[in-house]
Amino acid sequence: MKFLQFSLYSIILTSLVLIASCEDDIDFAGDHVETPVLFGLLDKNDSLHYVKITRTFGGSNNSLEVAQIEDSSYFQDVDIKVEEWAPLPPNNVFTKVRTWVLRDTILTNKVPGAFYSPNQKVYYFKTETYNIANPPVIGDPNTNVALKDEATYRLTASINGGQIVVNGETQLVGSMAITQPSAGGSFSFVKTVNGIKQYNTLSLKANNGNAKVVDARIQFFFNEYFNGVPVQKSFIWKVGEQNGDQIVGSSATFTAGGETFYNLVKQNCTNDPTITKREMTSIRLIMTGGSEDLSKYILVNQPSSSLAQNKPSFTNLTRTDGGPVIGIFSSRMTNKQDKAKFNPTLPNQRALDYLSLKELCSGPITGLLLFCSDNPIDINAGESWVCQ
């Protein structure tokens, strides 16, 4: 699920563990209040939008054992809808434009931990991804058109035939864009200063638009060859996250160190003597911005540094009966910049520049990992680290 890019999901699970993992000799059966736990993030650059809803549980049984039982975390009956409200001409009055009734599905990507895995039930609806060349039109009858910047999205979750009704509302994160490196620029993790090679520190920047929390990651793709057959591998490097006052002005800036990059490549390569060679295939820069509510949720759920361990709580969800609810319904925006290993017609346009690729193939950290280059420039230059 794409919204798992944020550490929010692990925060929610941590909160649930704290709620549900009390000692066996404490009896919750008498005063336990069933509490929905709902989490969903909308992204106009996504075509599938997910909402997950579970519940807290109590009783005299061992909570850690109950947490491993999938059914213990789900309500018997859940109906979720998301409404789009947008200003319509001529008076720009906010009007309900579209309604999506979410369907449930099972994903198999839940990592092992205190709770059941790998299956998890989620609810989803589908739109088309945003196309800047053909932007969506307010009032368009095509129900699959992209989410809209100017709209407000309202969620209603009816649980167990309306016994519990949860409401949430959000606007979209927008106007966010990667500004550095440029779309045609290379990653340069090595440089020379006065003829001496050094590891370089890159600056990654994004206009944050109305985002109040920004996450930066680099995904490195490469092939490992077994008897001439390539197997695609990749890893994600979380470069950093800025939240609240850490974001200065209208942009978020991160630094990515070259030595760290090569060490991560080494750590993520398979230790298999039957591998005959490796090739980098592409690099992806991922910058994700979250809404103000999402920023607050992350800040509130960070580990407490207080000896008293007193922590505030935050949610933008409500229940019609005034009861408790945990979680958030908010938005984010994900920007991706993909760089191929090189452009066949313009071999100088590389994902890694010449020095950085040479370091990958023959440097002290990764030089024994059999990385090679099939770039025509490197082949014509007779470099020792070209692919054979």
Image: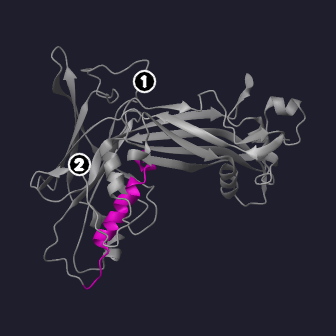
- Left/right placement of residue 40 relative to residue 342 reads left
Residue 24, how many percent across, how many down? 28, 83
Q: Secondary structure at mark 1?
A: loop
Which numbered marker is on residue 316? 2
Residue kind at label 1, given as amino acid type: Asn
Q: Which residue is mark 1?
A: 131
On screen, residue 240 versus residue 289, left or right, reads right
Q: Is residue 9 magenta?
A: yes
Q: Which mark is residue 98?
A: none
> Split into 4 quadrants, where in the image is the C terminus?
top right
Up-down relation of residue 362 to residue 335 (above or below): below
| Three-letter residue code for mark 2 | Asn
At x 71%, y 46%, the residue is 230
Rendered view: 169 above or below 64: above
Spot the residue most to the front: 194
Asked if the residue at tag 1 contacts the one at tag 2, i.e. Cβ–Cβ closer than 8 Å, the answer is no
The answer to which of 357 and 210 lies nearer the viewer is: 210
Image quarter of residue 168: top left
Does the magenta segment cover residue 94?
A: no
**Disc 2 versus disc 1: nearer the observer:** 2
Residue at the image point whose x is 32% and y is 52% from the top: 297
Question: Residue at coordinates 30% horizontally, 75% vertically from top-left?
Answer: 63
Give the residues in magenta. Answer: 1-25
Residue 327 in the image: state x and y as whole percent: 28, 54
Any part of residue 124 in sight: no
